[in-house]
Image (cartoon, rainbow, N blue to C red):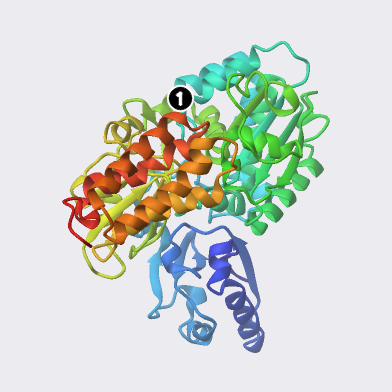
């Protein structure tokens, strides 16, 4: 029986993967062939989806992007034996996009059936959790700290410090919470991991729980991710049936119960305290800090809060050793992360690489430049609240401190590309409009400032008292940055001020009418 691998993550399904699977099954039946279709996560090359892979002698040959109408021709070309065809790509793991990556967190995504625990364990799964149970909490925290792992949710806070704080608390009741409310435009790494290898995430959360002494873990997944929710629930159920979760984790005597919760549709719940409020059944509004969640978190108890990629990095850190993980990256930005290429780009998708890779490498070499073929004018990194960077800054290394020094942020690793047809004044307006729509409304600088921001940019676009309104906009941005309660209002000015700084001609700062 021939085996064919085909993704069933949301991106692949959106462009017809289910229809391709149906066509493959029907065509095989017509020809009297036995076919085993294994649904996997995406390899991350979204520009090639639906991607069909056929394994022969341990090598997977890819064909893509495949439409249902291509299926009969693939059979005619004997693709099950690696036959030549116009859609043939060769060995998938030898493609430039794939072979130049450093796959650590995403090593299994696209290779295995996401719900097959035997495959997961055969590909190195559970090594981290077993190691954590063997060495104990203090040693785990030491390893996570030594690895240099920082929060992949955007803030870049050292993960080991969070865990150490919760470990040191004496309360009997503690929690582990994963914030999977991935809401930034141009980001999809959390979704790809949850749909392609949810066990890695569950293992990371289990390690955190046994480390700090928590018995319950919650994952808060955005409601717009139904496939990720279903996959994570199914994986957790399989873990419980295997005895890897529940009342006796891997026979250790430690308890860890795993709960999946669906988000309430609020962008602000990407902020940890607002997410905790939502988990408790309240309106998703940010909390004033201090106290921090590590001391007073879910239901007022000490809580480890990390995002998907932070938890998912931990199993490999323990399995391979902290020094191995810390060997990737640069300066204080250690390890790898998932760079997500989106917007006007020829080759969009997920590319895992160490910190230090340049923005130019990601956009021009890996992404292939703009899809339109026009010159790159601006790149926004870090979601809708990230800075707009001009083409002249594409040699900036992807590093937390380098970006901060440039007045930007790495954020969750989203990279959105714009060509030279973009109007940056309208992009600045979008930032304010987005904040006005998504603000939780708790603090005045964010709630009112964003609305005033839209009005002011509109006046600039209309050519009304341009110089005066630009000055007013800059003052408003300063107020929002300094006075907002959380990053929603505090970071909204970043795309606005960067657009003013690098693309002033789009605002006619000299006082000319647009």
Position of residue 458 in the picture relative to residue 215 (left or right): left
Which residue reaches farthest front? 465
Position of residue 232 in the picture relative to residue 69 (left or right): right
Q: Name the foreground residue: 170 vs 48.
A: 170
The answer to which quarter of the image holds residue 478 is top left
Residue at (53% x, 16% y) in the render = 142
Count of labels in the image: 1
Residue at (73% x, 23% y) in the render = 300
Taking the image as drawn, is residue 444 in sight? yes
User: Where is residue 480 drawn, in percent x and y?
Assistant: 43, 36
Position of residue 417 in the picture relative to residue 190 (left or right): left
Q: Is residue 489 above or below residue 371?
A: above
- Mark 1 lies on a secondary structure that is helix
Density class for disc 1 (Cα within 10 Å; few <14, some 14-19, many ≥20) is: many
In the rendered image, the quadrant that contains the N terminus is: bottom right
User: Where is residue 486 drawn, in percent x and y?
Assistant: 52, 33
The answer to which quarter of the image holds residue 141 is top right
Taking the image as drawn, is residue 115 in sight? no
In the rendered image, the quadrant that contains the C terminus is: bottom left
User: Where is residue 456 drawn, in percent x and y?
Assistant: 37, 51
Q: Is residue 459 above or below residue 272?
A: below
Q: Name the foreground residue: 264 vs 480.
A: 480
Q: Is residue 359 above or below residue 63?
A: above
Position of residue 253 in the picture relative to residue 114 (left or right): right
Residue at (54% x, 55% y) in the render = 111
Q: Name the foreground residue: 212 vs 185.
A: 185
Q: Which residue is mark 1?
A: 147
């Amino acid at each position: 029986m021939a085996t064919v691998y085909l993704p069933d993550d949301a991106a692949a399904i959106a462009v017809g993967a289910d229809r391709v699977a149906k066509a493959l099954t029907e065509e095989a039946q017509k020809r009297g062939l036995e076919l085993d279709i294994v649904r996997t996560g995406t390899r991350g090359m979204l520009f090639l989806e639906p991607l069909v892979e056929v394994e022969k002698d341990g090598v997977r040959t890819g064909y893509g992007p495949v439409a249902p109408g291509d299926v009969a021709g693939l059979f005619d070309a004997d693709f099950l034996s690696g036959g030549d065809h116009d859609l043939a790509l060769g060995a998938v793991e030898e493609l430039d996009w794939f072979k130049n990556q450093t796959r650590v967190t995403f090593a299994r995504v696209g290779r295995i059936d996401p719900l097959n625990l035997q495959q997961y364990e055969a590909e190195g799964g559970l090594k981290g959790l077993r190691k954590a149970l063997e060495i104990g909490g203090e040693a785990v925290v030491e390893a996570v700290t030594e690895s240099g792992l920082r929060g992949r949710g955007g803030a870049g806070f050292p993960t080991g410090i969070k865990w150490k704080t919760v470990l040191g608390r004496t309360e009997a009741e503690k929690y582990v919470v994963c914030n999977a409310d991935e809401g930034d435009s141009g980001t999809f790494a959390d979704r790809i991991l949850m749909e392609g290898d949810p066990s890695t995430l569950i293992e990371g959360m289990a390690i955190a729980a046994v480390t700090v002494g928590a018995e319950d873990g919650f994952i808060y997944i955005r409601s717009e991710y139904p496939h990720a929710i279903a996959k994570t629930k199914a994986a957790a159920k399989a873990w419980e049936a295997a005895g890897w979760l529940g009342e006796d984790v891997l026979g250790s005597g430690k308890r860890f119960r795993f709960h999946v919760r669906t988000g309430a549709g609020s962008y602000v719940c990407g902020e940890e305290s607002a997410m905790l409020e939502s988990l408790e059944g309240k309106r998703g509004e940010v909390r004033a800090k201090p106290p921090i969640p590590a001391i007073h978190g879910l239901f007022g108890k000490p809580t480890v809060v990390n995002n998907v990629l932070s938890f998912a990095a931990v199993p490999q850190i323990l399995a391979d050793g902290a020094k191995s993980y810390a060997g990737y990256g640069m300066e204080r930005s250690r390890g790898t992360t998932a760079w997500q290429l989106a917007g006007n780009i020829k080759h969009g998708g997920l590319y895992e690489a160490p910190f230090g890779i340049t923005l130019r490498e990601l956009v021009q070499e890996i992404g292939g430049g703009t899809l339109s073929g026009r010159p790159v004018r601006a790149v926004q990194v870090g979601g809708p609240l990230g800075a707009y960077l001009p083409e002249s800054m594409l040699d900036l290394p992807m590093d937390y401190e380098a970006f901060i020094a440039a007045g930007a942020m790495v954020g969750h690793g989203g990279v959105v590309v714009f060509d030279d047809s973009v109007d940056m004044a309208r992009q600045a307006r979008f930032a304010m409009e987005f904040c006005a729509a998504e603000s939780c409304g708790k603090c005045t600088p964010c709630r009112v400032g964003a609305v005033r921001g839209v009005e002011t940019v509109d006046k600039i676009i209309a050519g009304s008292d341009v110089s005066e309104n630009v000055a007013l906009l800059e003052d408003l941005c300063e107020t929002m940055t300094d006075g907002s309660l959380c990053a929603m209002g505090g970071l909204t000015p970043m795309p606005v001020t960067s657009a003013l700084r690098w693309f002033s001609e789009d605002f006619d700062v000299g006082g000319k009418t647009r």
